[in-house]
Image: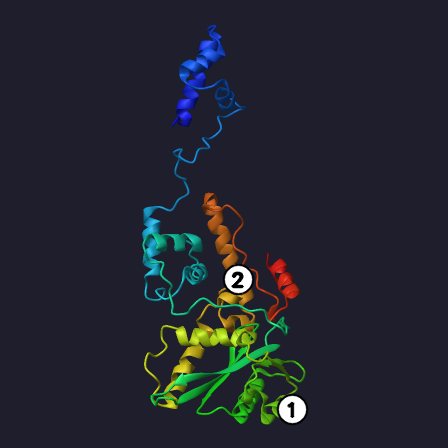
Amino acid sequence: MISASDRRKAVTLIRYTCRKGARLEKACEVVGISIRTYQRWTKPDTLPPDGRTTAKRQHPTNRLSEQERQEILAICNEQEHSSLPPSQIVPKLADEGRYIASESSFYRILREAKQSTHRGRAKAPHGSKPLKSHCATAPNQVWSWDITFLRSQVAGIFFRLYLILDIYSRKIVGWEIFEEERAEHAASLISKACLAEGIGRDQLVLHSDNGSPMKGAKMLTTLQRLGVVPSFSRPSVSDDNAYSESLFRTLKYTPSYPEKPFEKVDDARNWVHRFVTWYNHVHKHSGIKFVTPHQRHTGKDIEILSSRTKVYEEAKHKKPSRWSRSTRNWTPETEVWLNPTSSENDNVLEQSA
């Protein structure tokens, strides 16, 4: 193995002997290289780097210091961050005016410290090709709702959580828990949510699956009276109501979800009330550039993301060698699609690129 410094010495010696009258071929033979190798080493300006995979490389000068690595591990192991992945931690720190390293650096350091286990109980989602599409460009244009079961202490008996989500802001705009599934309960909840959000006629699309409470006569009559356009998933395809399914997954896999069944319906209501408050006002949602649903719903996310962009730009200005490309794009999403077609999905990807 000939290092770059040894190659420079060899070139210098060959040139010196040639100036003294030696033939290039003989000089190269003494050094132990061919004329072709000598010509390759003497290409314009600088010697080319050793392209062999076994060559020794210089360590990059922009790598994190040991102090920074320990700081990252300490932050990830803090109680408030212990159940969050780096994709949540880094934007949260940026909102506090702090930038230490990128998400990939956080992941790498956790992996090297053997702390890269999945921070949560959820399994990887399985996508499927949706059919019907709706697009939201502002809050209160497209809502998604569904019902999920919450275990009670009596085997086979469940409490039903009715929950409505705004797909643009991801805000929970209405919820209630009942002991049975009835279209009357759903109609009452929808009416209250529309009143609370000030929904006008022909303003809102309400998407759901094909359950009996969703298609009951009382429910459909209420939607018609309110001027709400109903939308339904394909039969036996749960992924057509992806936003509600995702929210239920978040609810049941959050670290605070009780390990034991709820004793009474009021216990379930108290816990869900705390969850909704946390979800709307504290949780930084990955689908809306890691701001809270309440911030997105009220339009405060624009100022927050603008401030976050400045934090990243200042971090890049301080240590530009750590950035191989532009800073992360924190521009708010202007369109949110429910079950986009392939062509609509391509358009969304082009706009976000």
Q: Residue at x 32, y 49 (%)?
A: 67
Query: Measured along the vertical axis of the image, is residue 179 above or below residue 67?
Result: below
- Between 31 and 195, the one lying in front of the other is 31
Q: Residue furthest right?
A: 202
Q: Quadrant of residue 169?
A: bottom right
Which is more foreground, mark 2 or mark 1?
1
Q: Residue 188 at x, y = what percent?
A: 54, 91
- Between 200 and 310, the one lying in front of the other is 200
Query: Measured along the vertical axis of the image, is residue 27 above or below residue 42?
Result: above
Identify the secondary structure beneath mark 2.
Answer: helix
Q: Tell me the tag on residue 295.
A: none
Query: Measured along the vertical axis of the image, is residue 67 above or below residue 116?
Result: above
Q: Residue 279 at x, y = what percent?
A: 45, 74
Q: Residue 219 at x, y = what percent?
A: 59, 90
- Between 12 and 74, the one lying in front of the other is 12
Looking at marks 2 and 1 on the same chain, the residue that comes earlier in the sequence is marked by 1
Q: Tell me the tag on residue 305.
A: 2
Name the residue type under label 1.
Answer: Arg
Q: Residue 261 at x, y = what percent?
A: 34, 84
Question: From this viewpoint, is residue 318 visible?
Answer: yes
Identify the secondary structure beneath mark 1.
Answer: helix
CA neighbours of label 1 inside 10 A, class few (<14), some (14 to 19), many (20+): few
Query: Measured along the vertical axis of the image, is residue 50 above or below residue 212?
Result: above
Instruction: Say left or right for 285 vs 218.
Output: left
Image quarter in which the N terminus is found: top left
Q: Which residue is mark 1?
A: 225
Q: Residue at x 35, y 61 (%)?
A: 117
